[in-house]
Each structure stands twice: as C-alpha cells, then as structure tokens.
Amino acid sequence: MIQVDLLKPAGKSEPATLDRPLDHLVACHQRIEDKLVVLERAVAHLEDRTDEALYACHSVGAFLDAGGKLHTEDEEESVFPRIRKHAVGEELAYLDNLELQHREVEAFVSRLKNQTKHLERDPALRPVRETLVQTALKLAALYRAHMASENEVLTRIGRAHLDEVDLAEIAFEMRLRRSHAA
C-alpha cells in the first residue's frame, strides 16, 4: 500500500516575486491552494491516521493564519486603496465584497484551528471530528472561489488602474511587511 505524505502538496507552486505584486498575489493563491489540498487530504484521514492528520490540519491552520494575514494585508492595505483611487461603481462594490470574504475566510481559519486543538486534546470526540471535516471543506470551497475571482477580476482591475509607481510602492510595502513579520 502506498502511503501519501499528508503534509506534501500535490503540485509545485510557482515562485513568487515581489517585483510584480499582482503576479505575487496569484502565486500566493497557488501556495494557499497547495495547503487546501493538504487540508482536504488530512481530514479524509482523521479516522485512520489521526495524529498525522491533526498535525497536518494544525500546520495548514498556522500557515493560513500567518501567510493568509500577510496576503490579506497586502491586498487591503496596499492594493485595494490604490485601486479605489481610480475605481468606480461595480469595481468599488467588488473590492468591498472581497474584504467581506476575507473576514469570512478568517473566521473559518479560526474555527479550523480551534477544532483542531480540541481534537488534539481528545481525538475520540466524534462530533468535533465531523465538524472539523465540514469546516475544512467549507473553508476550501470559500477560499477557492475567492482566489479564482481575484485571479481573474482583481488582477484585471489592478492592471487597468495601477501604474508603475503604484506597483513599485506596493512591492516596497510588501517587502517591508515581510521584514517585520520575520
């Protein structure tokens, strides 16, 4: 029987470059997708490989909490405000909706982390295990829809409204944010 490494993503993420902030955001989405695949694989093995699956859930939750926070800050503090200077109507509503989606994803990441902690203390809690599976699957679905929209719509809007000065400022802020996070 072939054992699958629950912590290893299925694919290979593209390297991100902060020199091209919009491309960096898309590359971050691929890394998040890799973690979502790990999460789905982990919850599928909560019964037969409980410790390993919980460790994978814990690792994914920590990544989404830390890396997801930086990613959201990149968008909400650097990208969105610069786009808002030029956006109108539907574009502004779209950015508002993305921020609401960020809050929803953050709430699901928090639930994932809390449910994982409960199961790490007592893996026999079947109701918590079932809830963890549902939380993980809902989180993956929400995140995927959100990332697909950003990859298509946000990058298009960004390319239409952001000039070289905006992009250079965004890249600088992203680097600065990461230097403080390290």
Image: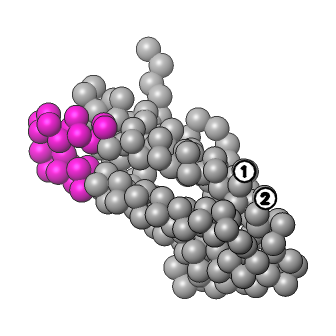
Secondary structure under the numbered disc 1 in the rendered image: helix
Residue at 79% in and 81% down? 166
> Toward which corner of the image does residue 21 lie, by quadrant?
bottom right
Q: Could you tell me if the residues under marks 1 and 2 are in contact, i.e. CB atoms within 8 Å?
A: yes
Residue at 72% in and 82% down? 85
Distance (Cα) linking label 1 and label 2? 6 Å
Question: In the image, 140: left or right of 109?
Answer: right
Residue at 43% in and 36% down? 40
Q: Residue 16, percent across and down? A: 73, 61
- Read off the residue under disc 2: 156
- Read off the residue under disc 1: 152
Report if residue 47 is visible in the image: yes
Q: Residue 179, percent across and down? A: 60, 83
- Tell me which amino acid carries mark 1: Glu
Q: Residue 32, percent across and down? A: 55, 51
Secondary structure under the numbered disc 2 in the rendered image: helix
Whether residue 141 is in magenta: the answer is no
* 42 in relation to 156, above or below: above
Name the outermost residue toward the front.
Answer: 89
Residue at 39% in and 42% down? 138
Count of all numbered marks drawn on residues in the image: 2
Question: In the image, 21: left or right of 3?
Answer: right
Report if residue 102 is visible in the image: no
Residue range (magenta): 114-134
**In the foreground, 52 or 137:** 137
* 133 in relation to 68, above or below: above
Q: Main secondary structure of the magenta part?
A: helix
**In the foreground, 11 or 70:** 70
Q: Where, quadrant-wise, is the N terminus in this rendering?
A: top left
- Tell me which amino acid carries mark 2: Arg
**In the foreground, 114 or 179:** 114
